[in-house]
Amino acid sequence: MPRPSATVKTAPSRAWEDYLKIIYKLESLTPANKGVQTKDLAERLAVSKASVTNMLKKLAEEALIQHEPYYGVRLTDSGRKIAMKMIRNHRILESYLVARLGYSWDEVDEEAETLEHFLSDKLVDRMWNDLGQPTHDPHGSPIPDVDGHIENKPLPALSHLEHNTPVRVARIKNRSPEELRYLASIGLHLGSRIVVKNQAPFNGPLLIEIDGAQLHALDHRMGLAIHVTPAHEADSPHV
Amino acid sequence: MPRPSATVKTAPSRAWEDYLKIIYKLESLTPANKGVQTKDLAERLAVSKASVTNMLKKLAEEALIQHEPYYGVRLTDSGRKIAMKMIRNHRILESYLVARLGYSWDEVDEEAETLEHFLSDKLVDRMWNDLGQPTHDPHGSPIPDVDGHIENKPLPALSHLEHNTPVRVARIKNRSPEELRYLASIGLHLGSRIVVKNQAPFNGPLLIEIDGAQLHALDHRMGLAIHVTPAHEADSPHV
DNA sequence: ACTAAAAATTAGCCTAGACTAAACATTAAA
DNA sequence: TTTAATGTTTAGTCTAGGCTAATTTTTAGT
């Protein structure tokens, strides 16, 4: 008959990993003096605030986060390590699916969102090596290294550019499959050369030229998610 | 705030899938007039018999099994369908890992055991097509088709062969990684040509010749797990 | 400074899927 | 045919991770 699991330092569950990953992502959007808010976690995890509070207590007990009640939460080093592993797994799998199994960039997130929790280190490592040890995923996001270090170069967003300055698309953050498909349909990919011709007032749409050809109007919020490098810097980005 | 999940025909959980898969596997070892026993399920799932009974009740409510209390359990068509899907996922992933990511046949089961529950239909289909729609996995086990049909050709085991009749290894069932590694180390693979020279009495070890060269003593129980085809039938098997 | 709104926490409850211990059924053996 | 051994089920717990409702703390607006 089965044995009780005793005090065996149980592996972090999927739920824990999800919490830690979201906390990591929200930390970068949070002013440095504040922690990540319960409310925002609840929203991103599609879970009640009470559930979040409840879970934060457990994560804090395991020293994966620091929880200052009412002031928010912050990852500890061990918590960050787990978050980075999930992000590494996620981004390597996405890269693999695109490069080896014919996925398009709008299809990969859904698949990776689940599988990131169940991939062995061995499998992730083999995919990464098979791909030639890429540094960025199909959306241009950096892949953390095995020790959890990640490139952190802030790139300007399309919406914040001077007009008529050519740039190249380096990264698209957090867009839905529909939006990604739309971008691909107008010929906007990683590495595309963009010139912002105009921006309508009151955060209105951008008028952009893609690869010297078509003109397109692009919603302001889409422009915020598209990050670029100066056109001369790297002719084609990491892919 | 999140919604209650209501009566949304919830997807089968990992636990359900594991139960159904094991029931399927045990059915073939169970005399046709009997069902699969609770005890055997408990053993294979490493779970108490009471837990099994409890779960069987739920599976029966969902019409995934027929549960005749005290007489055991049997899959319904819908239950079998889920079981076959898990087996398909498992075997295609194993095949993929070996063919594309350099895994050896002793490494794949562990990885597949978890991931089989989380692979999307799309991913499985793409792996299967990328591999050229294989019909058998790296251990020679048949891969069910998308509709849940599976080849069911009974193959004789090494232990039950006439002596001095050359055969080819077609399938190795349920061996541990250690045993599989041992077999590989003595040059016994799918497709190896084997001649059984002798079997010691009282279910003693077999004396076998592998690919016309080395002689090896092989434990009787190992011989039961190694299934073969006549040497002339197919020169090299499905791989 | 005071009050209303927003955010966070507490308290109590629920379900899935485990568990143990005890009761009950079936089968095989004497 | 009775009994012992084995297998199965019932009854009652437990933990993870959700939930709602009520309460408390912090923040923002007058």
Image (cartoon, coloured by chain):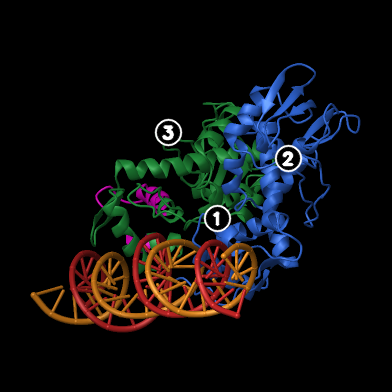
Chain colours: A green, B blue, C orange, D red
**Percent x, y for residue D18?**
43, 68
Identify the subunit bearing mark 3.
Answer: A
Q: Which mark is residue A151?
A: 3
The stretch of residues the image draws in magenta is A19-40
CA neighbours of label 3 inside 10 A, class few (<14), some (14 to 19), many (20+): few
Dividing the picture into quadrants, the one containing residue B128 is top right
- Residue count near mark 2 (Cα–Cα under 10 Å), binned few <14, some 14–19, many ≥20: many
What is the three-letter code of the residue carrying label 1? Glu
Q: Quadrant of residue A208?
A: top right
Task: Identify the chain of the residue marked 1, using the numbered disc in the image.
Answer: B
Disc 1 target residue: B43
Which numbered mark, 3 or 2, is in the foreground of this view? 2
Q: Looking at the image, which residue is at 69% across and 37% down?
A: B203
Residue B110 at x, y percent in the picture = 57, 41
Quick one: which residue is furthest to the right in this view?
B232
Q: Amino acid at mark 2?
A: Asp
Task: Give residue A26's mark.
Answer: none
Residue B170 horizontal/vertical position (percent): 79, 35
In the picture, residue A169 is in which quadrant? top right
> In terms of secondary structure, where does tag 1 sit?
helix
For the C terminus of chain A, the image quarter is: top right
Going from N to C along the chain, the mark reached first, 1 or 2, is: 1
Element at label 2: loop
Dot 3: what SS?
A: loop
Q: Is residue A20 above or below residue A94?
A: below
B51 with respect to B206 (left or right): left
What distance separates the C-alpha of mark 3 from that of mark 1?
48 Å
Residue A25 sits inside the magenta stretch: yes
Circle 2 is placed at which residue position?
B137
